[in-house]
Amino acid sequence: MPRIRRLAGAVALTVFLAMSASGATARAGEEKPPAAPQAGLAVSYWVDGLSTINKLDSSIVVGRGHFDSMVDLATGKITGDLHLPPSKGQFLAFRFMPVGAVTDFIPAGPSSGTITAGIVDITSEVYLRTRDANQNGVPLDLGAECVTSTPVKMHIRGPLNLLGKSEFDTTYAIPPFVGCGGKENLDRLLTAMISGPDNALHLTLTFRCSGVNCS
């Protein structure tokens, strides 16, 4: 525990010194040396989530994943990679038809945003792929590439506890689905059941590790 506290304290001090007031004013009569390039700080967070699909009036537990980020200490810019495991869900499609499926979250590219005065503002984009579906326990052939036609944009903003736990609530839209169905085209069925706005997302970010040894 003392070692963990020392590491956390060192990281917090680094972030505080780098992101507060951009360095001290040069002493009178002293020539200011050239500014050294600012190094980025690697920080990784555990990610846990719960999403409520508006049309299905049902929730999916987003299993524990992780967000590996790099913070530019000079500008506050954040870039990172979001890794989420597949999530299983059971729903009542159209409020009467029992349906089960697995959802994969496929990153569309790096996440990006900023942290300013402790407030993080970041956007991640992922494709949703639905597979291993069943209706009343009977397999439903969706094919191998039943995905959203465009990425889902997940935008979070709020206070970030760099070395602790932070919680965020947001909403997002699910685009239409394409590529669904083996023997018949099920794009319209999946789109009618799932796609649309005002889907709720609750995310918890918990400090995982930082520095070059973070893996």
Image: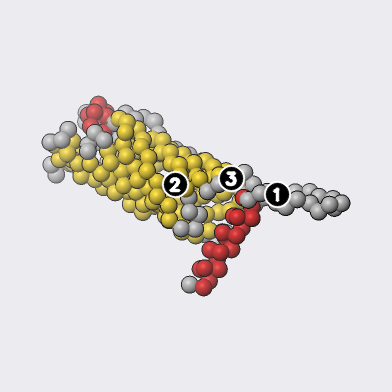
* Residue 129 visible at all: no
Colouring method of the image = secondary structure
Figure check: 160 above or below 130: below
Residue visible at 31% across and 43% down in the picture: 51
- Relative vertical location of residue 58 with respect to residue 26 in this rendering, above or below: above
The percent position of residue 89, horizontal first and vertical second, equals 24, 45
Task: Say which residue appears at 37% left-offset and 43% top-offset.
Answer: 169
Sequence-earlier tag: 1 or 2: 1
Q: Which residue is mark 3?
A: 76
Q: CA distance from mark 1 to mark 3?
A: 14 Å
Instruction: Return the residue found at the far front.
Output: 28
CA–CA distance in space, label 2 to label 3: 19 Å
Dots 1, 3 in contact, CB < 8 A: no
Residue that label 2 marks = 82
Classed neighbour count for the residue bearing mark 2: other residues with Cα under 10 Å, few (<14), some (14–19), many (≥20): many
Nearer the N terminus, badge 2 or badge 3?
Answer: 3
- The residue where tag 1 is placed is 37
92 sits to left or right of 69 = left
Three-letter amino acid code at the position of disc 1: Pro
Name which residue type carries label 2: Leu
